[in-house]
Amino acid sequence: MSGAAFIGDQERQSARGSSELLAPLPNFRVQGFYAINQNWGAAVALGWLSADYDGYDGSFSYLHPRIAYAFAEHWSITAGYQYVKIDVTHQESNNRESAFDMNFNGPTIFMSYRF
């Protein structure tokens, strides 16, 4: 993972690091859907995880509210906003700590086929 800043035509490296971790990480997710009427519906998905393992400490948060419109018997279109936050800290053996904070936010749109 690395980060950089751009000012005009100049680039400055701000951070660089790498690490590997392979561990089972179950997370808790809840999803709900409410049919407003025959064509409109609203949904939300929530997720959360927090773990501390072998020098790694981190959390994962997920939120995805959306609204759907059925424009045909089997087809619908859905629009929403997705928010994902990942925070990971790694305590290395030489008392050096690396931290990675990532946010993935933005609108979503997709089509669904129901059967």
Image (spheres, grey):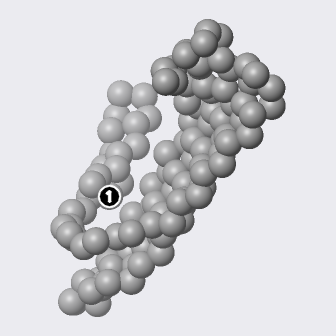
Q: Can you give x and y, in whole percent of width and height, for residue 64 in the image?
A: 60, 44
Which residue: 53% across, 60% down?
29
Residue 87 shown left or right of residue 38 in the figure: left
* Amino acid type, residue under disc 1 in the picture: Ala
Instruction: Report the number of discs.
Output: 1
Q: Can you give x and y, in whole percent of width and height, for residue 90 in the image?
A: 32, 77
Quadrant where the N terminus is found in the figure: bottom left
> Residue 49 versus residue 36: which sits nearer the camera?
36
Q: Can you give x and y, in whole percent of width and height, for residue 59 in the image?
A: 47, 70
Which residue: 45% across, 55% down?
102
Residue 59 shown left or right of residue 43 in the figure: left
Q: In which quarter of the image is residue 79?
A: top right
Query: Which residue is farthest right?
Result: 36
Q: Is mark 1 on a helix, strand or loop?
A: strand
Which residue: 80% across, 26% down?
37
> Residue 9 versus residue 38: which sits nearer the camera?
38
Query: Which residue is farthest front?
Result: 115
> Residue 98 versus residue 70: which sits nearer the camera?
70
Using the image, determine if residue 12 lies above or below residue 69.
Answer: below
Residue 58 appears in the picture as rendered: yes
Using the image, determine if residue 96 lies above or below residue 104.
Answer: below
Residue 8 shown left or right of residue 109 in the figure: left
Q: Mark 1 points at which residue?
A: 15
Q: Can you give x and y, in whole percent of width and height, for residue 75 in the image?
A: 55, 15
Residue 98 appears in the picture as rendered: no
> Residue 107 versus residue 40: which sits nearer the camera?
40
Crowding near pointer 1: few (<14 within 10 Å), some, many (20+)? few
Using the image, determine if residue 89 lies above or below residue 95.
Answer: above
Residue 56 shown left or right of residue 34 in the figure: left
Which residue: 61% across, 25% down?
78
